[in-house]
Image: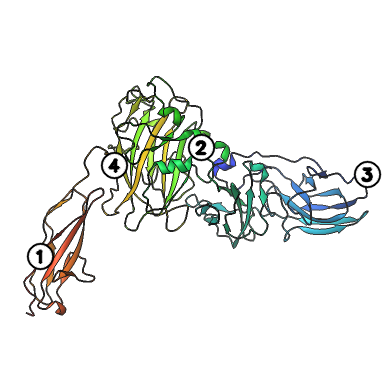
Amino acid sequence: MSFTRHHLRFPAVFAAAFAIVAVASVATPASGAASASGAASARITGTVSGIQTDPDYGLTAALVTVYPADDPTHAVAFSFVARTSAGFEIEVAPGSYLVSARTEARATEWWPDAATPDTATSVTLTAGDEAELNFALDTPAASFSLDDTDQPNFRGLGTSGTILTASPGTLSPAPDSVGFQWASNSSERLSTTVVLPGETDPTITVPDGMPILFAAMTPLKPGYSEWPVLIPYAVTDPVDGVDQLLAAMDPDPTTYASARAVEDVIPLEFVVPAGIAVGTRPIRGFPTAGNSYAVLSTGDAEQALEPGDASAELSTFINSAPFELFWQTDETRVRLMLAPPAGQECLAVDLMFGSELVPEYIDVPPADSDYASVESPTVDRGEDGAPPNNFARAPGGAVISPSSGLEFTVEPGWRIDGWTQPVTARVPLSGESLAGPGYTDVVISVQSTDYLISDSVLLVDNLRFEEASGCPTDGIVTPLDEPDPVIEGTRPAIAGAARVGAKLRADVGTWSPDGVVLKYQWLRNGGPIAGATAQTYTVRLRDLASRISVRVAGTYAGADTIKLTSTPTPRVRLH
């Protein structure tokens, strides 16, 4: 099967997986179809006009294709027309057919290579019949463009029986409508893709036993080319052991978490299970929760856990997916789709980063070519090694790497040249997810920009959620052996007169550490006053003869919340 890439561009990694094939025969039976020559036969003749030049490849050609009327997914014959206007002649066996014509600068048929009943011409032929069909393609030159910030995407968990929704992204100009056609793949070979009859809505219930779903989305607007956006979705995770990898991170048991070891746009042949592993061998306090931890590596993750010394190289040529396609980089990443509890939109996770670039490249390039990242991104089609949206940083503010300021030292008996101390990363969750509303995505990755020189390893454990209030926005990691922060505050005092109509103010005094978030609750005779949660409170008539106080709660990521209450006022008087 062949694909061409036109104005509506595929995700780059998807387009790279397919070749462009030019068909150069005339009146040719399709593969597997017997020629009608020498037997009772019929003929289809006619012309094709209005053939436009392909905007990307400069080819002026069209293809006339004949499909059985009862099976419009398998062509039985085709004719290649190589001028702007020309005739064609096709010999077929007697029967009923759908005949379509398309130019290399337009696709009005289903993908892949299937006629659509509303655009194809129907003919029924007996022996000796000849049908004349004239196609006027008249392809317009105008084309849609895609907004780089809103590319084609899927939303949904992707598990069997759940709803998966396809979106073509933001198109300019806006199409009048978008045609949808789903296709599937029942094996690991992309070439076996077949159209799913009747699945022409933006949503589909994910069927059982189909590792890959494809969505062809065709924008429609008079005067504009109708090139479809084609994107794949890997339904079942292609990486062996990813469920065990997730379990080794010890995610919060009260939340839902699912893992996809690659973005949904990555073809299976670029995914190598050797990039992930589950570790149990103790090192510097790992595992920090449970009895195992997750391992992500740009080399062989299992080798990184084996006893040895720093002179032993990891397998650097496993090409763990997917970024060896771009600038010879190598990255292993896992995307988690999480449903954090309400109010706990701060991710905390324990990490330890190791690299083969230390100590010799600590202060010189390419020390910044190996790095680790934990982020909660705004949803996009993949970072491609670019700076992430919202990520954990080393103390200097850089992505975690050998040159980012974290100290690297050798761990005796381990193959990696240098390890950081264990650290905890805290990242505010974006609230966006490929799974749709109610979920938030987290991407954990390790990368080696020059995979010919070195490999890096990231240990991950104790994935948990904390209160959103006070979650650091700078993402600076903290050493794991440091004590948790402790909030200290001054008991609040109330300024103002305790009489009806007067405004009272909470004087909070001094609180630490910097960045502690304060919340207020005013009290009447010790009970909370509904809606009174600001730093000030205006005394009401209903407060007459009551005593008013204020409670201040301080929150900070990783610290226990403390609550301090003021001394009550005298009883409220009228004047």
Which numbered marker is on residue 476? 4
Q: Where, by quadrant of the figure, is residue 97 drawn?
A: bottom right
Q: Quadrant of the N terminus?
A: top right
What is the distance, in whole Å, between disc 2 and disc 1 at their CAs?
60 Å
Tell me which residue sits at (36%, 49%) in the image: 252
Q: At numbered mark 1, what does the secondary structure look like: helix, strand or loop?
A: strand
- Three-letter residue code for mark 1: Ile
- The spot of residue 49 in percent (x, y) is 77, 53
Check if mark 4's residue and mark 2's residue have beta carbons within 8 Å. Answer: no
Q: Where, by quadrant of the figure, is residue 125 drawn?
A: bottom right
- The spot of residue 345 in percent (x, y) is 34, 53
| N-terminal label among 2 and 3 | 3
- Three-letter residue code for mark 2: Pro
Of residue 160 and residue 426, the one placed in the foreground of this image is: 160
Q: Which residue is mark 2?
A: 322
Q: Which residue is mark 3?
A: 38
Of residue 537 and residue 89, the one placed in the foreground of this image is: 537
What is the distance, in whole Å, between disc 2 and disc 3 at their CAs?
52 Å
- For label 4, the crowd category at 10 Å Cα-Cα, with few meaning under 14, some 14 to 19 and many 20 or more, is many
| N-terminal label among 2 and 1 | 2
- The spot of residue 296 in percent (x, y) is 43, 36
What is the distance, in whole Å, between disc 3 and disc 1 at their CAs?
104 Å
Tell me which residue sits at (68%, 54%) in the image: 110
Q: Which residue is mark 1?
A: 494
- Three-letter residue code for mark 3: Gly
- For label 3, the crowd category at 10 Å Cα-Cα, with few meaning under 14, some 14 to 19 and many 20 or more, is few
Check if mark 2's residue and mark 1's residue have beta carbons within 8 Å. Answer: no
| N-terminal label among 4 and 2 | 2
